[in-house]
Amino acid sequence: MKAMVGRASERIAKVQTRRRELKALIEGGKTPPKHLKMVMVGAQWSAKSSAGNTILRKQAFAVDHNRTTKICEMSHSMVADRLLTVVDSPGWYYNNTLHDTCKMDKAEIENIMHLCPPGPHAVLLVVGLASAFNASYWQAVQQHMRLFKDEVWNHTIVLFTRGDWLGRKTVEERIESEEGLQWLVEKCGNMYHVLDNTKRDDEAQVTELLEKIEEMWAGNKAPLYEVDLGRAEEMEARKTAKGAMAKRIRKTSQRQDRILRELFRGERQSITDVRVVLVGRKDSGKSMVGNWILSEELFDSTWMKKEFQNQRGTTTCVKHEGNTSGVNFSVVEAPGWSRDLTVPDMIREEVKRGVSMCSPGPHTFLIAVPLSQSFTKADYEAVVEVLTPFGERVWRHCMVMFTWAEWLNNRSIEEHIAAEGKALRKLVEQCGFRYHAASGARFVYPFPINELYQKMLVMMTRNKGHYFAAEVKKKKPMANWQEEWNRREQELIDRMLKAVAQEPDEPLLPPVKMTASSNGAFLPNFSRYRDVWSPKARHWVSEWLTIGAVNSEGTSGIGSMTASYAGKLENDPLMTTFFHRKRRNEVRSSPRQILHRRPTEALSLSKTEVAYTSRQNVRVMGHTIQYRTHNTV
């Protein structure tokens, strides 16, 4: 104890000496900026937002017991004759490694520096004194600070919050008691400060922090932490692309839902006994999902620190039953696997046993995925490995169950899916774009099960009310025929839904661009020439165009298809039938009438009927017409 107190005294003396040196620089004429820009980074529940409010002397950032900061937020204020700009950022889960943090949070944390161009004067690394700075916390801080350049440490001050937890100890004694804190403050050049957020009226603690920021500024060669503007543009472009992808995911899910509701209109299943199997890695929230569904605290959902997670958790399947909103639920939770290890054989066997506990078979597999953590390729492969023994049919009964939805705040679940990367998008796609997000708030019962149950009903209706059967028993010949019919019907529906998922947002055919003639005039509007072909012929033209003829980029509207596609037309059955009927019912029109058709009608002339000579002559139905254009095919 005496040794620790001695080391703490030495640190205080070293800090005071350094502060005197830096103050001398300011007094010597190095005037600090009147506008101080600072950003705050740190773990969740480290009281960042409260610290921002204390510094700005106002309620600038929302504060409650849940995670309140999901995106970067900025606020300004005049404090101690200085204009302050403070930016708050989302906090990472306190013992999550950088690998564990979801990509959307990592992008937001990295983006905080770009909100103060050309860069902030100070980075406040917030550490709560109410928590032990153990090995996992230390590792999380080290790794998340790698989101920035190495120069960030020259501009960083460790801001200790919850100073009231020190009691009679000094902050230096607390630093000397933990190896991780010693490393951290030395990494920042012994720049640290303590805030007591319970003393909001104590302006002296804020003024002292601002003086330390100015002293750090005076001692740095670079006046601020310079951001890479190219990186900022890259992140903005990526954010825009992910936003477009999120809209596509939402639209695909809605399209498929509408199609299924229309296909099975009048066939909606009314199932009051639903059997559910919960699968997922450890600490993915499976137990909480089971408790939500049953509206009762039946599954063990004890929260414990990461260091002790390997000593807890079920190693066998657990089953509970209950009635919620008039529906009898049987829920089986399968044991989870560690994400840093391969899935052991024991887990795979237990999942099989969990399916058998839902005799005669489960209606739904809920795959729990926590929104507070990343979802990697290894996580996807682990899910596939667990479900592969049941065959491809199992995916028709699967739904992704996102847990800890409060982590999203005002962001949509589709934004998270798009930002997290290919692995999560692939899992959602493999589950037929069926997913649901639920909050991790405990003891909020009854859980709003209706929306989840409605999604289950749509899936069960799509499966014609059939549960998943791991073993197919032999049936009578007529039953086998019926089974084959159902199988082919399901395959057809699968193909149709996949086609919807792959459907582009924009039309495949680009708009036709009219090309100017050599005398500067443009081709006239052909829309009034509707009587050239019969309605039946125009129907065939429209049907052929729907198949996918590809127009050239610049076209006069006559026969300007790409050569690669035109070469395939002679063998196209639809085109053969079309031209056979067209010639049989051909209207003997003048060449001028034929040319003056709408572009969509004119494009239907095949390459055998339109040919260009070196003199720009057009051959149409036996007539040769001189037609002067430029930039044609």
Image (spheres, grey):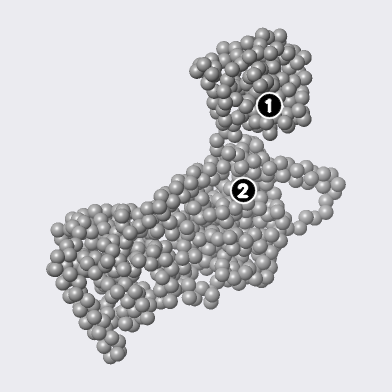
Residue 39 visible from this viewpoint? no
Residue type pointed to by label 1:
Trp
Q: Can you give x and y, in whole percent of width and height, for residue 51 in the image?
A: 27, 63
Residue type pointed to by label 2:
Gly
**Of callouts 1 and 2, which one flags the residue occurring earlier in the amino acid sequence?**
2
Foreground: 300 or 141?
141
User: In the rendered image of this protein, does residue 615 appear above or below residue 548?
Assistant: above
Q: Quadrant of the C terminus?
A: top right
Residue neighbourhood size for the residue with mark 2, other residues' Cα within 10 Å, grouped as few (<14), some (14–19), many (≥20)? many
Foreground: 283 or 338?
338
Most extreme residue toward the right is 477
Residue neighbourhood size for the residue with mark 1, other residues' Cα within 10 Å, grouped as few (<14), some (14–19), many (≥20)? some
| Residue corresponding to mark 1 | 544
Q: Quadrant of the N terminus?
A: bottom left
**Residue at (82%, 44%) from the top-left corner?**
481
**Residue at (76%, 18%) from the top-left corner?**
581
User: In the rendered image of this protein, does residue 590 appear above or below residue 480?
Assistant: above
What's the CA distance linking mark 1 and mark 2?
31 Å
The answer to the question of whether label 1 and label 2 lie on touching residues, with beta carbons closer than 8 A, is: no
